[in-house]
Amino acid sequence: MSAVIEEHHPDDHHHGPDKGIMRWVFTTNHKDIGTLYLWFSFAMFLFGGVMALCIRAELFQPGLQIVSPELFNQLTTMHGLVMVFGAVMPAFVGLANWLVPMMIGAPDMALPRMNNYSFWILPFAFSMLASTFLMEGGAPNFGWTFYAPLSTDFAPPSVTFFIFAVHMMGISSIMGSINVIVTILNLRAPGMTLMRMPLFVWTWLITAYLLIAVMPVLAGVVTMMLMDIHFGTAFFNAGGGGDPVLFQHVFWFFGHPEVYIMILPAFGVVSAIIPTFARKKLFGYDSMVYASASIAFLSFIVWAHHMFTVGIPLAGELYFMYATMLIAVPTGVKVFNWVATMWQGSMTFETPMLFAIAFVILFTIGGFSGLMLAITPVDFQYHDTYFVVAHFHYVLVPGSVFAIMAAVYYWIPKWTGNMYNEPLGKTHFWLSFIGVNITFFPQHFVGLAGMPRRIPDYALQFADWNMVSSCGAFLFGFSQLLFLFIVIQTVRGGKPATEKVWEGAHGLEWTIPSPAPYHTFSTPPKEIPEAHG
Amino acid sequence: MVRKDTSARIVSDTNQARTIRQLLLVVVGMFGFGFAMVPLYDIVCEVTGLNGKTSGEYVDDGSQEVREDRLVTIQFLTNNNADMPWEFRPKVRSMKVNPGKLNSASFYVRNVTDETMVAQAVPSVSPFRVAEYLHKTECFCFEQQQLATGEELEMPLSFIIDSEIPEDVTILTLSYTLYDITDQTDALASAP
């Protein structure tokens, strides 16, 4: 037997990927899986984007023109679910797959086979979720927060498919997070101490802990829904001794950490990009780590600020108001650190840097409107208005999404070995930047004036700003086709990238050739460079 | 495992298994915590009077001192949840009572549909903070009501308002919402 194996040895010892489609189905390579995650996320981004454009088209003018109110509710719900669970989260998992092993000098993720499973669950979960559009009674229509009893007693029959889709996404996220934590804790190259890790690795480590802490709670809450709907329990049914407000507590216990899950890795990305293009060491590395950890901790004790108007005791409202405002402190530390890093740096404004700077400015605007919403007495006015919509789109679109785009521009030369087209990249940035602000800034105004969210029709007084907002949405939406074009163009060719790619880049991933070989750091790196130079 | 590398990383396999076990424990624990939030929530509601939840059956052990010097108005409200078609109203809309004294009131209910239905009344007290001062020694809300077509019922309520009720409270409202739980009762009855 052994002789046979010996003979086959040259074949076994391949270093490149398999050929054909099966390469992608069976791959356990962190780079392949990262690529799969990123493409999947982009597909979901377009799917969620098309739904957003349907919504904005309907809201272009008052009255009902394009979609029925029933379909409108399904669109807002599915847009939220697809963007949160299908676009933003998988994009960050994709970045983690590509970058974490390369940044800590590991040969691959710690659990490569599980890595493959956690990706391949997702297309099935989202196919099932998307198929609800074709079912009798339509897709879920209760908003992405799926409050009971809207999502139990009054839900369309497709809610059961929604529940199983959420279970599958949860399993995928939990497996992905365990993988990230085990990789970071066990596979760091010798000399890569925790406090030398790049901030992207740090923020992902913290995010992964958040995920394993709250995704099971989400699984729990949808399980309770499932039991209420099909097995006669009454977790959320007051008639049976339950309480619909309980749903909101359990949901937001998951939901608030979830919003930090979507922003912490973005902090890590921006902390990598700004020092590179400011050609300065990151200001306050240690405080960045502690601030990220504080934000993660605080995220567990502020959930009821989403529920000020449901009727909680005064003491509770005061506590949740102050605790929420406390988050502004570590977040402020981060923003000041980024600004201080840029201060007196030799800055250049390549596309990743433009996105990163836009992130700092626009995310801060979103943070400020968040502070306004945290003030309990005024929240009674803002609650469920377009002001809330403007707030969370400011932190999610020019926040998380811009950070993801910045990351793609920053690392794509390392991934593909080719430079992207800089003028086109800058065009994409400016179109997106202008589009995003035209879309979401006017929503602050209509929100403060009292326009409720999740409605297909509205009073005439809101007409002008809604029209402006819709125009911006179409500009932003179609600009993303340019992004798709740029990425495809870069994958297919372009100016060869150097090993270091960027003049000011630091960290292990810039010490390997571009494109990154299929297997990297099979032997640990000898020297550990400082990541934030 | 793909890793066939230097001694530096060989130690990690046992570490790795331990990390995975710990993380899985966290996952299972947090799934359990999600469900633990249900009883926790009830406890918090009881302690804080959140949602005006009243406590269960109260045993009158004669420890309450009757406050002849004080009168508190208690108002009775009835609501029907969503599509609940039953007729449901209090026999008296409001009473003036002495704290510490046992009182009784009754509620009228009639099944106006042509089917047998099961209902459950859920109480709520306003303002929330006085919920803990309302003691019910007997209440129709402790059990479910099954009424046949056209059947009517007078449902009793006996209560004591705690003699320690804050002095500034002169009025409180006890509201009942009637839920149709026929489906759930069927589901439970037919469950294996």
Image: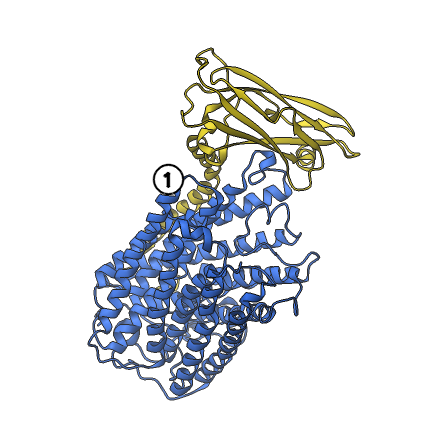
Chain colours: A blue, B yellow
Horizontal and vertical percent position of residue A501:
31, 81
Q: Residue at x 35, y 51 (%)?
A: A324
Q: Nearer the viewer, residue A342 or A422?
A: A342
Q: Residue at x 33, y 60 (%)?
A: A203
Q: Decide: is A326 above or below A109.
A: above
Total numbered circles:
1
Q: Nearer the viewer, residue A42 or A527?
A: A42
Q: Please indicate, yes or no, whether residue A107 appears anywhere in the rendered image.
A: no
Q: Residues within 10 Å of mark 1 (few under 14, many from 20)?
A: few
Asked whether, in this view, residue B68 is left or right of residue A498, the answer is right
Q: Residue at x 42, y 75 (%)?
A: A14
Q: Nearer the viewer, residue B23 or A452?
A: A452
Horizontal and vertical percent position of residue A150:
60, 49
Q: Chain of mark 1?
A: A
Q: Decide: is A126 above or below A153.
A: below
Asked whether, in this view, residue A524 is left or right of residue A385, the answer is left
Q: Nearer the viewer, residue A423 or A328?
A: A328
Q: Amino acid at mark 1?
A: Ala
Asked which secondary structure carries label 1, the reply is helix
**Quadrant (top left/top right/bottom left/bottom right) for the C terminus of chain A:** bottom left
Q: Residue at x 65, y 61 (%)?
A: A69
Horizontal and vertical percent position of residue A437:
43, 73
Q: Please indicate, yes or no, whether residue A28 appears anywhere in the rendered image.
A: yes
Horizontal and vertical percent position of residue A487:
45, 80
Q: Which residue is mark 1?
A: A315
Q: Quadrant of residue A126?
A: bottom right
